[in-house]
């Protein structure tokens, strides 16, 4: 439907057209949004202990030092399960192959060559 004057007789067609367009827009927007994670669930400290397999005092210490992502409301601490899992993944140790490649890249990047002289001796 192009720029037409909508009369009372054409109103049902216009409403159908607009409805189709809204449905199409909703579909396009939903494709653009990232899928919602089932793991973005609010958990309390007991569940956090179970997820990261640490004792309560250790969790309190990690939160106090700002190392573990947490939310405090009143006297209670809350955590999101997906944030705890990503915190664990960020602490992943590198394999010996990865550290060797990094070490080699650092050594190659820091190699200095003798500058070429622009003056030629005869």
Image: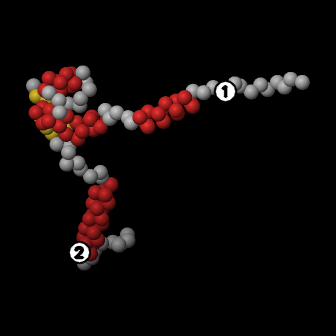
Q: Quadrant of residue 83?
A: top left
In contact (CB < 8 Å): disc 1 and disc 2: no
Residue 91 visible (yes or no): yes
In the rendered view, does 107 fall on the left or right side of 15? right
Between residues 65 and 114, which one lies in front from this camera angle?
Answer: 114
Q: From the image, tell me which residue sits under label 2.
A: 12
Q: Is residue 38 above or below residue 49?
A: below
- State how far apart marks 1 and 2 are (Cα): 78 Å
**Residue 73 in view here:** no
- x and y, in percent, of residue 104 in the image: 52, 32
**Could you tell me residue 98's position as x and y percent?**
43, 36
Front: mark 1 or 2: 1
Q: Position of residue 44 (x, y in %)?
A: 12, 34
Find the residue positioned furthest to the right: 122
Which residue is at 28% across, 62% downward?
A: 27
Task: Return the disc, 1 or 2, that comes first in the chain's sequence.
Answer: 2
**Quadrant assignment for the C terminus:** top right
**Which residue of the protein is positioned furthest toward the bottom in this rendering?**
9
Q: Viewed as shown, does residue 105 lie left or right of 78?
A: right
Residue closer to the observer: 69 or 8: 69
Colour approach in the figure: secondary structure
Residue at horizontal 22%, vertical 36%? 84
Residue at image position (20%, 30%) is 70
Residue placed at 30% from the left, 65% from the top? 24
């Amino acid at each position: 439907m192009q720029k037409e004057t909508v009369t009372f007789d054409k109103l049902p067609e216009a409403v159908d057209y607009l409805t189709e367009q809204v449905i199409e827009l909703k579909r396009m927007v939903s494709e653009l949004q990232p899928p919602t994670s089932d793991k973005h669930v609010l958990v309390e400290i007991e569940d956090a202990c179970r997820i990261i397999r640490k004792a309560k005092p250790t969790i309190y210490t990690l939160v106090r030092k700002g190392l573990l992502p947490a939310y405090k409301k009143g006297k209670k601490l809350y955590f999101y399960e997906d944030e705890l899992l990503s915190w664990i993944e960020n602490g992943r140790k590198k394999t010996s192959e990865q550290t060797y490649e990094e070490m080699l890249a650092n050594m190659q990047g820091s190699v200095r060559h003798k500058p070429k002289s622009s003056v030629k001796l005869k």
